[in-house]
Image (tube, coloured by chain):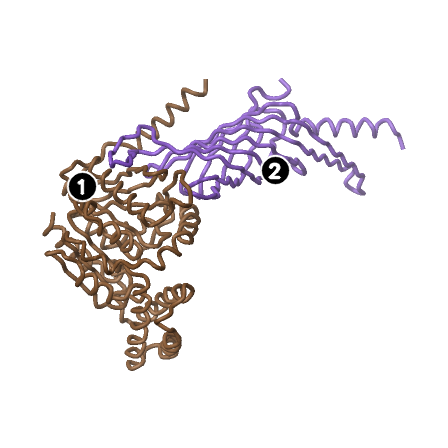
Amino acid sequence: MPRYPVTLFLILISYLSFSQTPGTREVSYHFGYLSNNAVRPGLNVGVEYGLTEWIKLKSKVKPGRGAVNMVKIHQLVVAANLGVLWHPKTSTSLLNTYTIEYRKTGRRRMQYQLGLGGAYMRSFFPNAYEVDEDGEVYSRPLGSAGYFGPTHFIGFGRYRTFPRTFQWWHLRIAGTYLLDYNAFLVPYLTAEIRLGFHKKPLGE
Amino acid sequence: MIRNPLILMIGALLLFGCQKADLADLNETIYVKNNGADMPVYVRGNGASKCFVVLVHGGPGGRGLEYAIGKSQEILEKEMAFAYWDQRGQGMAQGHYSVNELNVTQMTKDLRAVVLTMKAHYGDEAKIFIMGHSWGGTLGSKFMINVSNQSLASGWIEADGAHDIPRLNVQGIKLFKSVATEQLALGNSTAKWTDILNWANGIDTLNISYEQGGEINEKAYEAEELLLNDGILANGDDSYAPLLSPTNMLTSAITGNITAGLLDPEIESTSLTDSLFKITVPSLFLWGKYDFVVAPQLGVDAFNKVSSIDKELVIFQESGHSPMVNEPELFAQEIIEFVERNK
């Protein structure tokens, strides 16, 4: 069996595969539609950076199908997000999260993700007043309350072929545990569809 | 760079949330901060009437906007404005405070803060009526027996209010026995009423435990369901809270359940019947004849005990624990007449 053409073929296939999967040490930006329990709509913007990656390449020659190459990329990605959730009759909340995520890119560039991190949410109230111990009522412009808490999420999505500005989409569900909300810990669920962009398409 | 657009966005959203309200058709939210809690008050209805009913919701663990739906509110909000208040630790209320600040006395102070804020927001000429349903009757009664609080209110409306938990358990068992006997004689749902009668006969009314108190509450809804199915209770309103309301149901359910659990031991021993004589403001007591949760005898007691000159007790003949659901038109009419008389 001619060794060099096969090697060359495998290298070419690998190159093509990698050109269609995410690289590490690249910054991408994302923009998403965020929703809390389908009640409060919102928007999210953020930035993410691939810290490191592990690549697994499997090549098989199958009868009748020729060479089958499978590339799996396992990555660690850090991200910062700033979301705004809104309801005209309750509050406008800023949800700021910092996360580290394990992301796997597998067959057909499908991506699966699992991550955790920390969050800070600040809710701003309309027509806010405060009453002191003497019964005096004060107006509180931009009256608000803030909460810290851990957050975690799962999601899936797809990385699009070839370097391009709109590079991926993800759908993720996150649970953030707001500490000292009222007098206890309260879970806060969000769902998000997010679109990932490179400032400049990779490869340019 | 990103700071300015964000501030603009938040400003625009808050501005949209704070639009100048049309007084005749109010639909706005006021947040009241008191001792660490940020509590929303959803004000809806005819504010031009200058009559505001502060609704003290049931539970504990309920939410103000549960009461904002249905025929009774449709009628009432045309005549006056309703302020649906989410109590501390319930509905969409939030903020920071310790578990020790979750008690009936603190919540009574919160209600005072809500009333003071309503007056600050809508002007001193605003007439405030307090209306408590179920657990809201406990909280409302506790608020009303304070003379200084009474001076802020033009009237007190108690709808199936639980102002005496030990007594309501005893009266509840009596009602179970009498209604079960009556329904068995009529031949209605005989197997289930027999079970209820046997269960009620097994309760020692001189020594009702905390667990039995919970059982009484559960059986009460079971009995109402039977009466509804047998046509004894009116099925006036089948509206229910839509998912897409300002209340986040998950957050509300979690915080409400925790709050209820923390308040329960204190509430179970709360008995205000002997203090009701301190109430001198006009009072209206609205009760369902088949209310097993808070038996109508408590309405009779309250009516007899308060010192108000203008007082009225209405027993709705085809209602259970929520006459605003069973007989919404009659319920609304009684409130309209009471407010008209005392505004």
Please state which of residues B4 and B280 is positioned toward the viewer in this rendering.
Answer: B280
| Rendered view: B260 above or below A151 | below
Please state which of residues B302 and B242 is positioned toward the viewer in this rendering.
Answer: B302
Left or right of B2 in this view: B112: left
Q: Give the x, y percent position of residue A79.
A: 57, 29
Type of amino acid at the residue the image marks with label 1 = Gly
- Which chain does brown denote in the image? B
| Rendered view: B146 above or below A151 | below
Q: Residue at x 78, y 27 (%)?
A: A11
The shade of chain A is purple
Please state which of residues A38 and B163 is positioned toward the viewer in this rendering.
Answer: B163
Cα distance in 3D space between marks 2 and 1? 51 Å
Left or right of A94 in this view: A128: left
Q: Give the x, y percent position of residue B36.
A: 37, 38
Residue behind mark 2: A113
Residue behind mark 1: B47
Q: Give the x, y percent position of residue A34.
A: 46, 36
